[in-house]
Image (spheres, rainbow, N blue to C red):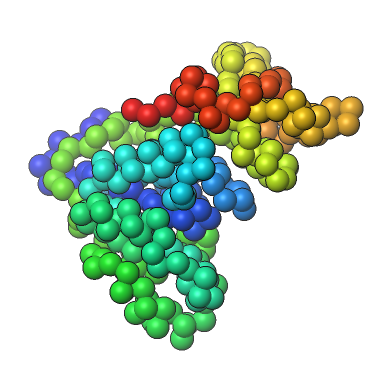
Amino acid sequence: MEPTSTNFRAGYVALIGEPNVGKSTLLNTLLKQKISIVTNKPQTTRHKILGIHNGNNYQIVFLDTPGIIKPKYLLQEVMMHFASQAVEDADVVMLLVDAEKVKSGSYDKNNEAVEKIKAANKTTFLIVNKIDLLKKEEILPLLADLQSLFPFDEIIPLSALTKFNTNELLTTLVKYLPENPPYYDTEIVSDAQERFFVSEMIREKIFELYEQEIPYSTTVDIIEFKERELGKHYISADIVIERNSQKGILIGKEGKALKRLGTLSRKSIEEFLGHTVYLELHVKVRSDWREDKNWLDRFGYKEE
């Protein structure tokens, strides 16, 4: 049942930043549920992932976005469109930075993500993530240094991994939300369908198991999803690659690599769905699909 209080606050909050700053980890921590895949490789997130956090008299609709980069091909251009769209839709924009990267001096203060928030004219938080990797005496000088980036409304150091200061972030965010009724049913954590999460879980395992260009040249297309109360759910998925030469790598000798991918993916999917699954994987070649608008639309990378 949806709240009717006139004091209810609801709003959209976009998470943006360079690749690998911990946006997806933070989203999963705040929701207390994994809805955004996480790997140690950059550019894992390709879509705008919507996650809903419901509290007493408030609803925060988080928008996780792909890491901000200069696009090199059409898929990356669409990814950057998703990020720009999230910033445009947001009531609050959260710029995440990696504390360790700032400390080491390798953080470019004029990066694409910073330029994007400067152009947005939005309420903006600076979220300094991975603060657990710093010594206490290093934190204040680092925060003072980052203040010069932009006139932020709030600067919050935290650790998405250890959950340090994440409750403080939620409490502060609520103060900036407009008075609105909830945008979504307060019983759900995302608007995405199970098929989407299943495809993302398979893609996550591809990022974990394969090296070099394979994860970036790959997408997952769910062909069939049959729910069965008395038996295993049946899921058939195509793993799409760009070139025939990648097929042998993905499948592996005697099919062992693909079998391992299927086993690990099935375990994650079963944990997520709470139901046993029969997972069938097929490898398909779609030449240069990352540069083909028709294929991108077909695989769900469609600009709204």
Percent coordinates x, y for residue 66 in the rendering: 46, 45
- The structure residue drawn at horizontal position 54% and vertical position 75%, both measured from the top left corner, is 104
Percent coordinates x, y for residue 20 in the rendering: 53, 55
Image-quadrant location for residue 252 = top right
Left or right? Give the position of 57 relative to 74. left
95 w.r.t. 89: above or below = below
Residue projecting furthest to the right? 254
Quadrant where the N terminus lies? top left
Left or right? Give the position of 155 relative to 30. left
80 w.r.t. 287: above or below = below
Residue 23 visible in the displayed image: no
Quadrant where the C terminus lies? top left
Image-quadrant location for residue 214 = top right
Percent coordinates x, y for residue 7 in the rendering: 12, 46
Residue 197 visible in the displayed image: yes
Percent coordinates x, y for residue 150 in the rendering: 28, 67
Residue projecting furthest to the left? 6
- The structure residue drawn at horizontal position 52% and vertical position 63%, both measured from the top left corner, is 162
Looking at the image, which is closer to me, 8 or 60?
A: 60
Left or right? Give the position of 118 relative to 95. left
- The structure residue drawn at horizontal position 52% and vertical position 70%, both measured from the top left corner, is 106
100 w.r.t. 239: above or below = below
Looking at the image, which is closer to me, 275 or 224?
A: 224
- The structure residue drawn at horizontal position 55% and vertical position 44%, both measured from the top left corner, is 44
Looking at the image, which is closer to me, 209 or 266?
A: 209
The mark total stands at 0
